[in-house]
């Protein structure tokens, strides 16, 4: 799993029929301090995340193990919206009340 922030939406009007109706988000990966790493991925949104939210992304065969993505040609899925994380007891991120 990777931490990432949603930075955009991807729209594809023509696609494989088995992925019709799925929402695609552009996610930029974050390091343990919340800084962008420069790497990005297009991921299926299985949890209804929105722009700017910090999320957990599963990739590879793990991406096809959610109820929404099972048996679909999917290589990345947003599977959680992050509320907070800490490293060594130090809080590195906490979702604000207005997010």
Image: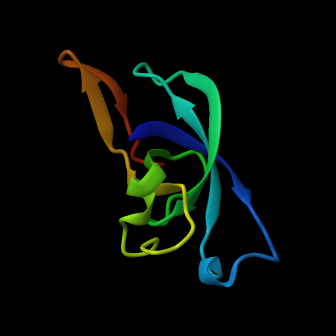
Q: Give the side of residue 41 with respect to residue 11, left or right.
A: left
Counting from the top left corner in percent of width and height, residue 20 is at 65, 81
Snapshot colouring: rainbow
State left or right for residue 82 relative to residue 27.
left
Across and down, in percent, residue 40 comes to: 64, 38
Given residues 61 and 24, the one toward you in this image is 61
Q: Quadrant of residue 3?
A: top left
User: Residue at position x 51%, y 47% from top?
Assistant: 53
Q: Position of residue 97 (x, y in %)?
A: 39, 46
Q: Residue at x 26, y 25 (%)?
A: 86
Tell whether 79 sits left or right of 89: right
| Residue 7, image quadrant | top right
In the image, residue 6 lies at what x, y percent?
59, 46
Q: Residue furthest left?
A: 89
Q: Identify the residue shown where x is 46% and y is 75%.
A: 71
Q: Who is closer to the viewer here, 96 or 75?
A: 75
């Amino acid at each position: 799993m990777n931490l990432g922030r949603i930075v955009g939406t991807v729209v594809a009007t023509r696609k494989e029929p088995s992925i019709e109706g799925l929402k695609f988000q552009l996610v930029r990966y974050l390091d343990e301090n919340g800084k962008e790493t420069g790497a990005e991925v297009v991921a299926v949104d299985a949890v209804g995340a929105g722009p700017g939210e910090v999320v957990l992304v599963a990739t590879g065969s793990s991406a096809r193990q959610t109820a929404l993505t099972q048996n679909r040609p999917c290589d990345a899925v947003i599977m959680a919206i992050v509320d907070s994380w800490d490293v060594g007891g130090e809080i590195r991120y906490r979702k604000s009340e207005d997010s």
